[in-house]
Image: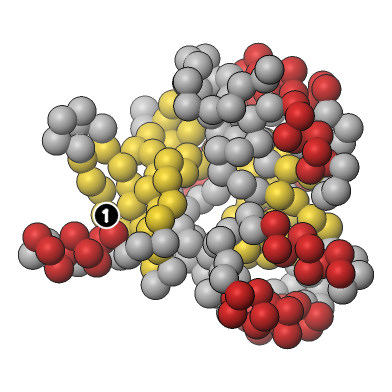
Amino acid sequence: MKSKILIYVSNPEYIGDYKALGVSAFLFALEDYCVGYETLPIEEIKKIDVSNKYILLNRILDCNDIDYLEEIISSFEGIKGLVFEDVGVYQMVKEKNLSFELILFQNHFATNINSVSFWLNRVDSILLGNELTLEEIESISRSVPKKVCLHLFGYNQVMYSKRRLLTNWSEEFSIPYESQNLLEDRATHVRFRVYENKHGTVMYSDKIYNGNVLFNNKSIYYYYVNPMLIEHETIKDFLRNIKNYENENCDTGFLYKETIYKLKER
């Protein structure tokens, strides 16, 4: 089952540890095309010697971004697939008749059978939204035309802004700047883990999402593990004992408590 894990890699030095623990599919965030992740330039990604190599492109792109991507995408030798958010990436791959696997990863959108089925008739797989209950995940995965991907472990993305929020707050309120920070809402005391780069800001949940209860479905395309902002030793501990893993800084997200903030079935 660990061959079904797709893990984001922030540091190529970690790959040996992941391989030793049974992982064989790796995701790398492309420089200038991602927010909320530590990125690598395409030349460095191409040098990494793994067989199942995927590139993450999770920004909403403008015309200049698309134009430059179109210039370089044909040079993506050794890349098995693209995990993308902007549908312009899908259109480009189809128009250029490129052979990449395509996995659609739009946080908060893939939450119902109709929208998931629409995209599965066009791409190889889709990462289901992280707001779904266990019952909803099981219902969708049974009812759509292809295998889906599921979040398995990592901080859940709460929001994404093209604005550099940490920079803005630092300048406005004279707060010492850090590219990653832990913020707390004064009214609710809800905390967020915030990561910024030059292309924008992502807020993650304070608790690590642990979806190990899902790790029993052989029909899943990939289980996604996101080590962003998590200690490497914690990730290794999880991979060693996925089904029985427990950590006081983990929760199960919305698996057992429904949220109203999603598009429901009709």
User: Which residue is drawn at the image coordinates 65% and 82% (left, top)?
Assistant: 68
Q: Is mark 1 on a helix, strand or loop?
A: strand
Q: Nearer the viewer, residue 158 or 17?
A: 158
Q: Which of 119 and 212 is in front in this view?
A: 119
User: Which residue is drawn at the image coordinates 70% and 57% (left, top)?
Assistant: 87
When the figure is inspected, residue 194 is found, relative to residue 117, above or below; the finding is below
When the figure is inspected, residue 143 is found, relative to residue 30, above or below; the finding is above
Left or right: 258 in relation to 264: left
When the figure is inspected, residue 262 is found, relative to residue 47, above or below; the finding is above
Where does the image place residue 186, in percent across and percent down from the top left? 14, 35
User: How many numbered badges does the structure rendering display?
Assistant: 1
Where does the image place residue 247, in percent across and percent down from the top left? 42, 30
Left or right: 183 in relation to 98: left
Looking at the rendering, which quadrant does residue 220 occupy? top right
Q: Which of 231 and 79 is in front in this view?
A: 79
Looking at the rendering, which quadrant does residue 30 occupy? bottom right
Check disc 1 and report the residue beneath it.
181
User: Which residue is drawn at the image coordinates 73% and 35% (left, top)?
Assistant: 115
Position of the N terminus, as image quadrant, is: top right
The residue under label 1 is which amino acid type? Asn
Position of the C terminus, as image quadrant, is: top right
Where does the image place residue 262, in percent across and percent down from the top left? 54, 28
Residue 158 visible here: yes
Where does the image place residue 130, in percent across and percent down from the top left? 56, 33
User: Which residue is drawn at the image coordinates 61% and 47% (left, top)?
Assistant: 106
When the figure is inspected, residue 55 is found, relative to residue 72, above or below; the finding is above
